[in-house]
Image (cartoon, rainbow, N blue to C red):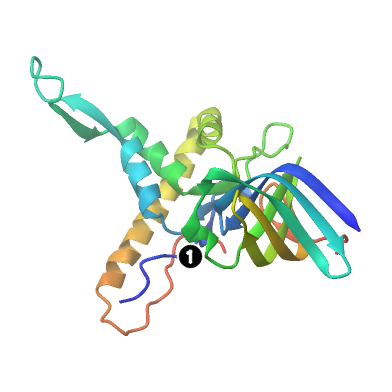
């Protein structure tokens, strides 16, 4: 299993932040990519979170990793988990390309 | 009645030098309120009246940049070493800082392009209101490059 852990990320609907994430772990196993993390209270937009497609976007220096959210579960206490589609890598200008980390 | 919510579509506007601007196609109500708020300044109606007698008027120096900040999502601008001036997903103050740092001619080109986009989108919305219920709504057209 491979994992990506980070502090800052977002659940995005288009260019909107549907929710801000503080602390996450993305893992990949035989079933595909999954993420677990915590949403920041006060920075969750229920309307935008209900829209589709939603993406989990985790920035890194010079770009971001992006996955489409296939199924999203939010829990009491601000925790969330989601199953994700294939990973794409996004450059500074938001241009995405498939990654070899599929 | 159709949906009162719009998808977060973006348009790309080609400007000089091969650069492009990525802009929101439409603003939400919250973004519009922020635009109005940032475009106005309080003025006292009459000297000597109580402090509550204030009115709002358009601030011509801020309304242009407020429109730019409302719509601008990204651009292809770089610094002198070719490094991208990153504005995507950055706080408003960071984007404002870059807008203040670019040369005046470039800024005015950005502002004119985005104001033209705003005008085109407002005209599209006005046109939508004249379409009879049930009729097909055409796609908006901006000075978009893609």
Q: Residue at x 34, y 31 (%)?
A: B61
Rendering coords of residue B99 (x, y %): 52, 34
For the residue labelled by badge 1, is the local secondary structure a helix, a strand or a loop?
A: loop
Where A61 sits versus A89, above or below? above
Among all residues in the image, which is located at the extreme right? Answer: A1
> What residue is shown with label 1?
B7
Q: Is residue A1 in sight in this rendering? A: yes
Residue B63 in the image: above or below residue B133 = above
Image quadrant containing the C terminus of chain A: bottom right
Name the spot of residue B31 as percent of width and height, x first: 40, 48
B22 to A30, vertically: above or below = above
* Viewer-side residue, B34 vs A37: A37
Total tally of numbered discs in the picture? 1
Classify mark 1: residues with Cα within 10 Å, few (<14), some (14-19) or many (20+): some
Residue A81: percent from left, percent from top: 69, 58
Give percent across and percent down for residue A79: 65, 51
Question: Relative to B110, is A35 on the left or the right?
Answer: right
Can see residue B24? Answer: no
Label 1 marks a residue whose chain is B
**Most extreme residue toward the front, as rendered?**
A76
Apparent side of residue B57 relative to residue B94 in the rendered image (left or right): left
Q: In percent of the image, x 76 and y 43: which residue is there?
A: A6
Front residue (pair A83, B101): A83
Question: Which quadrant is the N terminus of chain A positioned in?
Answer: bottom right
Q: Residue at 35% across / 75% down in the picture?
A: B2
Residue placed furthest toward the bottom: B134
Q: Residue at x 50, y 59 (%)?
A: A48
């Amino acid at each position: 299993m491979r994992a990506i852990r980070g502090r800052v990320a977002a659940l995005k609907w288009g260019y909107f932040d549907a929710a801000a994430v503080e602390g996450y772990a993305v893992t990949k196993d035989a079933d595909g990519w999954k993420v677990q993390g915590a949403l920041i209270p006060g920075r969750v937009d229920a309307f935008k979170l209900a829209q589709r497609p939603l993406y989990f976007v985790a920035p890194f220096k010079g770009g971001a990793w992006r996955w489409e959210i296939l199924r999203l579960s939010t829990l009491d206490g601000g925790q969330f988990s989601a199953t994700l589609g294939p990973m794409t890598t996004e450059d500074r200008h938001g241009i995405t390309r498939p990654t070899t980390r599929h | 009645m159709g949906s009162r919510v719009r998808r977060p579509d973006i348009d790309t506007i080609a400007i000089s030098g091969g650069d492009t601007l990525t802009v929101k196609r439409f603003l939400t109500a919250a973004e519009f309120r922020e635009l109005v708020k940032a475009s106005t300044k309080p003025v006292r109606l009459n000297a000597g009246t109580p402090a509550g007698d204030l009115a709002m008027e358009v601030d011509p120096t801020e309304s242009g940049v407020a429109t730019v900040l409302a719509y601008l999502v990204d651009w292809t601008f770089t610094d002198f070493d070719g490094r991208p001036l990153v504005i995507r997903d950055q706080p408003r103050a960071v984007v404002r800082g870059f807008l203040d740092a670019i040369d005046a001619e470039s800024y005015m080109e950005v502002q004119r392009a985005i104001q033209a986009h705003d005008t085109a989108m407002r005209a599209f919305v006005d046109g939508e209101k004249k379409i009879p219920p049930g009729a097909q709504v055409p796609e908006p057209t901006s000075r978009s490059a893609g």
